[in-house]
Amino acid sequence: MKDNNSIHQAIDRIHELGNVETGRGPKHPTSPNPQLASEIADFIDKYSFLKKDQSYVEFLECYAGLLLYRDNDFMSLGIYGFDDDVSLHLVKGEGELIDEAGMLTFADLTLPLQEGDKRADNLIGTGFAFDATQQRPWGVYRCINNQPYHWYCGTFLEWLEKLANQKGRLLEDPTPLLR
């Protein structure tokens, strides 16, 4: 397992993708917000299956949420957390925290279907979640345009690294899923 320096390195790489705002969790590297400590700890205790991915726990404790957006192609990414000034609150957001399929969605990504497309009417929505039922293999699951979730990668840190490596384009080839 990688230490939380890897989380910081991944977040630094995410900053290169566009305008990024990160929250300040109780273990933030430069300006911690201790007031969020009990809320995050209570959340992790209540949804203890999340402890299987320490990189996700470390992200919440350090950054408590993230917002990435690019005006030039309408890309936006919200990683839900506990800092209301940055992203949708993970617990207090709209709808149920765990959906009818047993998925706990932690992020949403909107981007143009075709790379380089600058039209706002050609966007695709992608959600990322963990399986709260623990009946599926552990990892990050992806849903494109409200299709069913499918396993995507093994850990939150791996997901962040894919996000950075692919410059936010976590679609590969979504065309078959959109038919």
Image: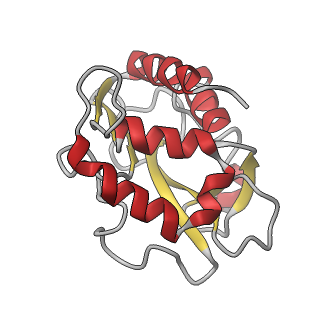
- x 59%, y 38%: residue: 55
- Judge whether residue 75 can be spotted in this image: no
Q: Position of residue 87 (x, y in %)?
A: 28, 49
- x 28%, y 38%: residue: 23
Res 132 quadrant in image: bottom right
Res 89 quadrant in image: bottom left
Which of these two is toward me, 62 or 132?
62
Q: In the figure, 163 relative to 29: above or below?
A: below
Q: Position of residue 68 (x, y in %)?
A: 35, 34
Q: Position of residue 48 (x, y in %)?
A: 59, 64
- Judge whether residue 82 can be spotted in this image: yes
- x 58%, y 84%: residue: 100
Check the image and tell me how it is coloured: secondary structure
Q: In the figure, 60 relative to 43: above or below?
A: above
Which of these two is toward me, 155 or 112?
155
Residue that extends furthest to the left in the rendered view of this protein = 85
Which of these two is toward me, 153 or 174?
153
Q: In the figure, 127 relative to 57: above or below?
A: below
